[in-house]
Image (spheres, helix red, strand yellow):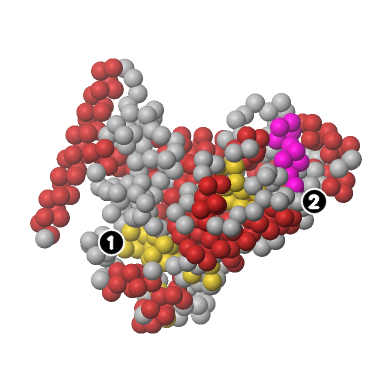
């Protein structure tokens, strides 16, 4: 068995090397760039079996218990790493035997303040757009600290009901191209595993620091950039009218984006103590909330069956958001992993949206009028629900007095700078893929 594994390993090395050499030869002969995309070089990614499959990201506690009791291996022999994204193991919280604490991951975070659009939030002192997706270099630092390789199945776990760091980091990894067969969320978290097998959970496990790896997101076949939308993409979708938006809220006042199909869906309505509700319960909740949202907007539209909901969603861009971009990850999990509906998460969410919006109480302020004129099409007041102003940032009112608020005017960018930066990082292939420094001109930016 060991000999067979070694033989397979060397066969893979030989295959990857030959593929890289053939690609390099073709590039040098033609004078063009090397196409290192998954589509052009499927043998180089033969280890990523089942890529882009419909496999579910949620995993039951019984399955995880079986993997741990199988010496941290899946049924097929893939190594398993359990990462607790919420606990530093210094207190008395329950920990999973053999799991890794977030404390040993030096650069772990679930969001990053990044510039996108005409306002640069990295210069500001408030939370405008503070919850954007983390950069590729940070993701690489995390997965290398975890010791991941392309064979590893990573299980994300956490304590409590609101496991934002678990669900958000899962979304981050999906966005960066991880396959759902390799990245899992323990449904119900540490508490669910304690119920399944109490011997695997205690309050004394010290955790450990695994050996670092050299694996990178740039070794993956392709990104799934369609899992994320920028503020510009939300605005364009609203202007096009072919969009459905769910705000992480249990009441209609939590909605911010004005569109005919703008609904609320609270994170607390998707799970109970971190354990996600079954599909039928989620469907009934969504139907009730859709009808309540329409009624709040004075519309007579209603749905009564799930078939009517799926008919409404068909062919539309479905977007989820919240206040800071993290709690909407619960909605993302509910839609994609329980209901099998592909949705995109707006990571800037309300904090960013409201930073570009005028407050109703002082909308005649000359500074606001000037600010909105500078923003042009990025003035989100044009696409907001006027009555819902709870938590509106005072950024617009401070525009004339705060030197940190820098607006690029005239703005000539695309409004999608984060996606462009991430794709550029991803397409600079790492040394593991045999294409260090080569740009992937043929890679798809989404799935």
On screen, 369 above or below 72?
above
Q: Is residue 352 left or right of residue 362?
A: left
Q: In the rendered view, does 56 fall on the left or right side of 364?
A: left
Q: Point out residue 118 in the picture as x, y percentages from the top left corner.
A: 68, 34
Which residue is rendered at x = 38% and y = 82% of the image? Answer: 198
Question: Does the rendering let one see residue 131?
Answer: no
Q: Is residue 269 magenta?
A: no
Secondary structure beneath disc 2?
loop
Q: Is residue 357 left or right of residue 65?
A: right
x, y percent for residue 275: 49, 70
Name the quarter where the N terminus is drawn: bottom left
The residue that disc 1 covers is 79
Q: Nearer the viewer, residue 258 or 442?
A: 258
Q: Residue furthest top?
A: 30
1 and 2 marks in contact (CB < 8 Å): no
Q: Which residues are magenta?
A: 375-385
- The image shows residue 101, relative to residue 425, as above or below, that is below
Q: Where does the C terminus fall, quadrant-wise?
A: top left
* Residue bearing the label numbered 2: 387
Magenta stretch encompasses residue 384: yes
Quarter of image, res 366: top right
Coordinates of residue 136 in the picture (x, y in percent) = 46, 45
Taking depth in this image into account, of 204 and 388 the one nearest to the observer is 388
Between 62 and 316, the residue placed more toward the observer is 316
Helix, strand, or loop for circle 1? loop
Q: In percent of the image, x 38 and y 40: which residue is there?
A: 222
């Amino acid at each position: 068995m060991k000999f067979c594994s070694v033989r397979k390993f060397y066969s893979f090395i030989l295959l990857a090397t030959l593929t890289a050499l053939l690609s390099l030869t073709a590039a040098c002969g033609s004078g063009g760039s090397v196409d290192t995309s998954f589509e052009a070089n499927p043998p180089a990614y033969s280890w990523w079996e089942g890529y882009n499959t419909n496999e579910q990201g949620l995993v039951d506690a019984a399955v995880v218990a079986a993997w741990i009791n199988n010496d941290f291996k899946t049924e097929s022999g893939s190594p398993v790493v359990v990462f607790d994204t919420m606990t530093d193991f210094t207190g008395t919280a329950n920990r999973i035997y053999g799991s890794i604490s977030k404390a040993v991951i030096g650069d772990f975070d679930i969001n990053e303040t990044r510039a996108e659009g005409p306002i640069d939030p990295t210069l500001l002192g408030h939370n405008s757009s503070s919850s954007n997706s983390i950069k590729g270099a940070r993701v690489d630092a995390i997965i290398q600290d975890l010791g991941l390789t392309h064979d590893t199945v990573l299980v994300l776990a956490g304590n409590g009901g609101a496991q934002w760091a678990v669900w958000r980091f899962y979304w981050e990894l999906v966005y960066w191209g991880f396959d759902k067969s390799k990245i899992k969320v323990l449904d119900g978290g540490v508490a669910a595993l304690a119920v399944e097998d109490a011997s695997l959970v205690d309050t004394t496990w010290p955790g450990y620091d695994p050996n670092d790896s050299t694996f990178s997101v740039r070794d993956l076949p392709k990104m799934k950039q369609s899992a994320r939308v920028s503020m510009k993409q939300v605005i364009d979708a609203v202007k096009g009218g072919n969009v459905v938006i769910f705000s992480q809220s249990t009441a209609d006042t939590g909605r911010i984006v004005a569109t005919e199909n703008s609904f609320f869906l609270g994170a607390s309505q998707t799970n109970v103590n971190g354990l996600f509700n079954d599909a039928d319960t989620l469907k009934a909740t969504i139907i009730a909330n859709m009808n309540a949202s329409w009624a709040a907007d004075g519309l007579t539209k209603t749905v009564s069956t799930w078939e009517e909901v799926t008919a409404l969603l068909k062919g539309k861009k479905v977007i989820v958001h919240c206040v800071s971009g993290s709690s909407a990850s619960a909605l993302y999990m509910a839609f994609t992993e329980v209901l099998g509906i592909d949705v995109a998460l707006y990571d800037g969410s309300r904090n960013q949206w409201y930073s570009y919006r005028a407050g109703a109480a002082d909308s005649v302020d000359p500074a606001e009028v000037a600010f909105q004129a500078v923003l042009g099409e990025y003035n989100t007041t044009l696409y907001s629900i006027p009555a819902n102003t709870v938590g509106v940032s005072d950024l617009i009112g401070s525009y004339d007095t705060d030197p940190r608020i820098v607006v690029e005017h005239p703005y000539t960018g695309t409004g999608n700078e984060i996606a462009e930066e991430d794709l550029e990082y991803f397409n600079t292939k790492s040394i593991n893929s045999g294409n260090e420094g080569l740009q992937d001109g043929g890679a798809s930016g989404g799935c």
